[in-house]
Structures are given as structure tokens and as C-alpha cells.
Image (cartoon, rainbow, N blue to C red):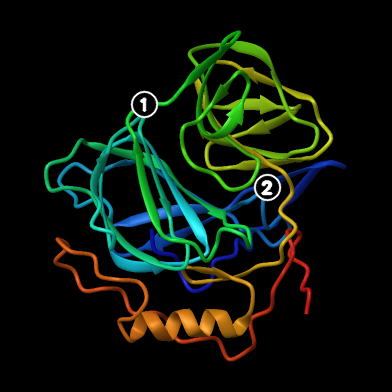
Amino acid sequence: MATEQAIYSASPAEVVDPDSVLLPGHDVPLGRFTTVRRLLPHRQRRMIGAWCFVDHFGPDDVTGRPGMQVPPHPHTGLQTVTWLVEGVIEHRDSLGSHQLIEPGQLNLMTSGHGIAHSEYTPPEHPAGMHGLQLWVALPERARRGPARFEHHASLPVWRCGDAAVTVIAGEYGTERSPALVHTPLAGAEVMFDGPARQRLPLNPSFEYGVLAMSGAASVAGTGLEPGSLLHLGTGRDEFTVDTDGAARLFLLGGEPFDEPLVMWWNFVGRSHEEIVRARDEWMAGQRFGTVTGCPARPLPAPEMPSVRLKARDRFGVSTA
């Protein structure tokens, strides 16, 4: 999914206890027809493990509307994770992949040194659209490797009391996702069918965040409404979820990612010069390949900012 030039959420974070921060996100238009709520990166909390970007879109009624319309655009240094609750999206990329994704399925695209892709809602589509688009930063050892695309039509589900947990990336509970990851990671949808009080395990060496997608819940004593993300920090071995009715949450976690990053437009790199090179090569039609089968023209890259881009650590602190 294409990003805007300014990718950071500037909405103020609310500190709810010494180790937790409530990140409200902000709305970002993607093209003419789709608006997403961007929750990461946030100025106060840039990453959760290697998760460096979180967009929550919907639930939207797209009856008689085009839905998602994202022309070909480039990526480097990251993985894209697409997870749908409602709707359908057609993925095409410069490897030649062509794949529809529906609710309960996973599209995982590893950009490596460079890839381009497009994402469209097909002309014949369901009435609703709701889901997540996430990025995972690739570590140094993987970020210059070959591009790759995976589609997983089914994923493992772990039952923990009242919670049905679908493990999308990495490991959680007793299950492991078949998707390829390059750092210790956890990504899981947590579903409650009705009122519940449930304790869920955590790895104390991971940092975690919990996103509310639908329904209201209290997570570790903090109320979450749809479209908000609670950063839980590290050092916890469990957390408690209380719900008054049905709720859908998404758990993000992983070992703290210690490599400073430069994030700009659709690129994740390590220096200003690296981002400039990626932009120039995209505009010159080099490196990223061609997305065949998509009639839309590729998205042009924005102009580079007038100031030098700085590498920042996971807390958003410049390392220059």
C-alpha cells in the first residue's frame, strides 16, 4: 500500500502507566477512495519489535464504490503484511505474482532490495472493507536479499479460554505461522465472541502493542476503542483483556529492533543517500521491475524534503 510523504502520526500519545502508551493514530487519505488510520510510526513510539508501520482501514461500506485503488509503487527494506476482516483485494507485483486475498488469509510480500506492487479492490466486490496493512522492517542481513511473495490461505488458530487467536506472523501461544520472518516476531488476531475476561501470555523479552479493530475492550486496565493502539513495552509475561461483548484485537510483538532506520515514502533504509538512490532508481524505471496486468500508471515519488533525512532508533531519537 502506498504511503504519504509525511508518514508519522503526530497525534499526542497518552501515557497510561509507566510502561504503556496509548497511540490514537490519525487519518491519512490513500488516493481518492480510501482513508486509513495510521498508528505507527508515531513520534512517541516508532516501532513495536520489527513492526514499523500500521494502517487500519475500515470498516467501510464500499457498495457502489471502487474501494481500494493503489497503483504500482515501490518498496525496499521491508515486508508488507495484508490482513482482511471484510472485503477482497487483488495483489499484483513485479515478480509476476497475481493473488486475491480474502478475510482470514495472509499476503506477505518481502521487498528485499526492491519490488513494486499494486493493490485494487476488484470491480465485483463485497459491500464491506476492513483490514490492516503492516510493515515489518528487515534486518541488515536480509534487507538486500531477493524479493519474495507468499500467500497463505489458512493459518493456525490457538484457543486460549474465551479467545480465538489466529497466528499471522511469527509465534504466539502454542502456534507458529508458516509465513517467513527474519526477526523474532509475533502477530496475531485475537477474537472474542462475547463478554469475557481472559489472561493472555507474553514473552517478557518482547515489546508488544494491542490494536482494537472492532468492539471495545479493556487491555491491561486501559480502555481501547476501535482504531487505537496500546503500546505495552517489555518485561510482561501476560496481560488481561476484558470485554463487554464481541471484540476483535490485533496483537503485535517482537524483540526490540535495534538497527536505526530511515523511513520515507515507501522506503525503509539506513541513510539519506540510500533513500535518494531508491527514489532516483524508481523514477528512472530501474531496480524495482514492472507490475504487469495493472493498467494504472506507476505512482511518481514525491520530491525529497529540503532537509537531510536522519536515521532514528526505535524511540524516534536521531542517531546522527
Circle 2 SS class = loop
Q: Position of residue 99 (x, y in %)?
A: 24, 45
Q: Quadrant of the N terminus?
A: bottom left
Q: Quadrant of residue 216?
A: top right
**Badge 2, how many Cα within 10 Å: few under 14, some, many 20+?**
many
Image position of 146 (left or right of 78)? left
The residue that appears at 50% across and 30% down in the rendered structure is 177
Q: Quadrant of the C terminus?
A: bottom right
Q: Nearest the camera: 246 or 75?
A: 75
Q: Position of residue 105 (x, y in %)?
A: 35, 33
Q: What numbered label is drawn on residue 25?
A: none
Q: Position of residue 40 (x, y in %)?
A: 59, 54
Amino acid at circle 2 = Gly
Q: Which residue is tagged 2?
A: 49
The residue that appears at 54% across and 66% down in the rendered structure is 7
Q: Position of residue 243 (x, y in %)?
A: 60, 18
Image position of 273 (left or right of 201)? left
- Considering every residue shown, the one lying at the far right of the view is 18
Q: Nearest the camera: 263 or 221?
A: 263
First along the sequence among labels 1 and 2: 2
- How far apart marks 1 and 2 lie (CA) works out to 24 Å
Q: Quadrant of residue 101?
A: top left
Q: Quadrant of residue 317?
A: bottom right
Q: Up-down: is 246 above or below 146?
A: above
Q: Which residue is tagged 1?
A: 154
Q: Are marks 1 and 2 in contact (CB under 8 Å)?
A: no
Image position of 75 (left or right of 216)? left
Amino acid at circle 1 = Ser
Circle 1 SS class = loop
Q: Up-down: is 234 above or below 172?
A: below
**Badge 1, how many Cα within 10 Å: few under 14, some, many 20+?**
few
